[in-house]
């Protein structure tokens, strides 16, 4: 019985707590990724008291931030209001859903400058934090972290495969015996269906069948839709729903470039650009831009008019597409569903969780395309994702030779091996790429 999920970000919270120049910490992330649970669990493990304010529910508390933002006055008021003593050494002050009280967000600046003896963590959705990029945001006065859905390595760790997860996280792909290959592929299939939303993962690891997991994912999608209605500008509501609901169709194309006409026949960029930005700020889509050249810095070669759009979670993509739970047991079908989109979505998700800003490249002449390109250790790396047994890599070879790149990376179901211009990385090792590349 798994009663709680371990999260790798907990180590970052430990480092923050003991840091010599600790600032208030702002933990961002999409809804239902487990921000509240993570901070509450951290507080329970490391502090005698946790003073939690939920700005979604505690409307009266907002009055404490309407006047002076003197942190000592705020702390005294919150302590009297909650009945929880606040001692700097053993109390965690937890501002949950801080985007609902912008004055509290501003107050973090003064906690940093005038009262950094207090341990303060705030959580906020992308939507609220990104929506107000004005003077109220405490730029340079907070430490910022992002909580993503569980990665495959976190999934493995919680599924009782801590040893394998550790080897992969350390970039020691060659040390993972072929004996474990089938087990890792089976776990990866399970992850591609379940995804990384904590509620879905916890249910699956406790024996829930595919349909029960799917019901949880549909509930999350319904909650997102309610958030659209509550928070999105009315003029954008129908359009952003169209973008969101047609994402499986976008990714099912052979060429995954986002096409406005798939959303609505005859649509143009100006019709949907603002809706795309809203979904990105809300934290449930990842925009992967096309670059004109595979040269450093990749950001200098971005073509803003061409991009791919992925969801934040592979399990939610499957739920959006109504992918059958039977795919878990049907050979390697899950990897090849709608032309390998699930596999490419998975790789994108693991790259983003490791801090990469993935791009892709397409030859203007149309005869070559690279699924992803990243900058690692100051070097551009071309990545091809193979969901099928066909491992021909003509596009990858062309890009490698044309731009004079370091050895390219091919992610596939095949085992780890190095060739003269290419490294084949097993799909199950995608989450260890950052460590692997930094060690080379």
Image (cartoon, rainbow, N blue to C red):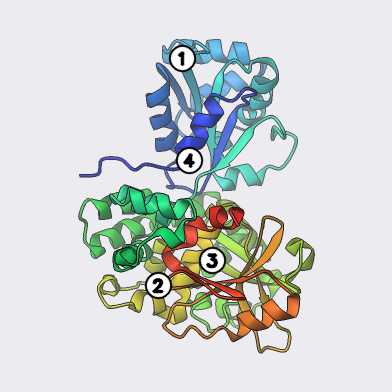
As drawn, is 87 to the left or to the right of 296?
left
Q: Mark 1 points at which residue?
A: 90
Q: Do the residues labelled 1 and 4 touch (CB within 8 Å)?
A: no
Q: Which residue is drawn at 70% across and 71% down?
A: 405
Residue 167 shows in the view: yes
Callout in the foreground (3, 4): 4
Residue 269 picture quarter: bottom right
Q: x and y percent of residue 297 in the render?
A: 76, 61
Secondary element at image label 3: strand
- Residue contact at pointers 2 and 3, CB within 8 angstroms: no
- Is the residue under label 4 in contact with that under label 2 (CB below 8 Å)? no
Task: Please provide percent x and percent y for residue 167.
Answer: 42, 53
Upstream in the sequence, badge 3 or badge 1? Answer: 1
* Quarter of the C terminus within the rendering: bottom right
Which residue was labeled with disc 2? 321
The disc label shown at residue 310, or none: 3
- What is the spatial separation of the Cα atoms under label 2 and label 4, in whole angstroms? 30 Å
Who comes first in sequence, dot 2 or dot 4?
4
Q: Is residue 35 above or below residue 49?
A: below
Query: Which is nearer the N-term, disc 1 or disc 2?
Result: 1
Q: Report the residue marked by disc 4.
A: 9
Toward the viewer: 222 or 193? 193
């Amino acid at each position: 019985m798994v009663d709680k999920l371990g999260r790798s970000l907990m180590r970052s919270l430990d480092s923050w707590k003991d840091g010599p120049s600790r600032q208030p910490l702002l933990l961002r992330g999409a809804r239902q990724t487990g921000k509240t649970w993570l901070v509450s669990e951290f507080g329970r493990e490391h502090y005698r008291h946790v003073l939690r304010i939920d700005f979604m529910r505690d409307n009266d508390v907002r009055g404490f931030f309407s006047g002076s933002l003197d942190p000592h006055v705020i702390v005294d008021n919150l302590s009297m209001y909650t009945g929880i003593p606040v001692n700097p050494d053993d109390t965690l002050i937890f501002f949950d859903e801080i985007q609902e009280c912008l004055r509290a967000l501003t107050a973090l600046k003064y906690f940093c400058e005038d009262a950094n003896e207090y341990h303060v963590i705030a959580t906020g959705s992308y939507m609220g934090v990104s929506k107000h990029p004005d003077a109220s945001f405490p730029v340079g006065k907070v430490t910022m972290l992002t909580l993503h859905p569980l990665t495959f390595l976190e999934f493995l760790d919680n599924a009782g495969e801590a040893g394998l997860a550790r080897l992969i996280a350390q970039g020691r792909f060659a040390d993972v015996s072929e004996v474990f290959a089938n087990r890792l592929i089976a776990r990866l299939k399970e992850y591609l269906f379940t995804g990384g939303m904590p509620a879905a993962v916890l249910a699956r690891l406790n024996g829930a069948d595919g349909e029960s997991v799917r019901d949880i994912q549909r509930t999350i999608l319904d909650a997102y839709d309610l958030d659209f209605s509550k928070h999105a500008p009315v003029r954008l509501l129908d359009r952003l729903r169209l973008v969101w609901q047609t994402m499986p169709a976008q990714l099912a194309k052979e060429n995954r470039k986002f096409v406005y006409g798939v959303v609505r026949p005859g649509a143009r960029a100006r019709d949907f650009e603002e809706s795309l930005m809203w979904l990105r700020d809300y934290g449930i889509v990842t925009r992967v831009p096309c670059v004109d050249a595979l040269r450093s810095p990749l950001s200098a070669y971005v073509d803003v008019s061409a991009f791919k759009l992925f969801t934040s979670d592979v399990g939610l993509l499957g739920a959006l597409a109504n992918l059958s739970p039977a795919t878990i047991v049907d050979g390697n079908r899950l990897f090849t569903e709608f032309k390998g989109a699930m596999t490419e979505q998975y790789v994108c998700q693991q790259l983003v969780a490791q801090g990469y800003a993935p791009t892709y490249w397409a030859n203007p002449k149309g005869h070559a395309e690279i699924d992803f390109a990243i900058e690692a250790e100051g070097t551009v790396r071309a990545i091809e994702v193979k969901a099928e047994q066909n491992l021909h890599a003509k596009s990858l070879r062309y890009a490698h030779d044309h731009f004079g790149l370091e050895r390219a990376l091919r992610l596939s179901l095949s085992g780890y091996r190095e060739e003269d211009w290419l490294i084949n990385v097993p799909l199950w090792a995608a989450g260890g790429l950052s460590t692997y590349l930094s060690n080379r």
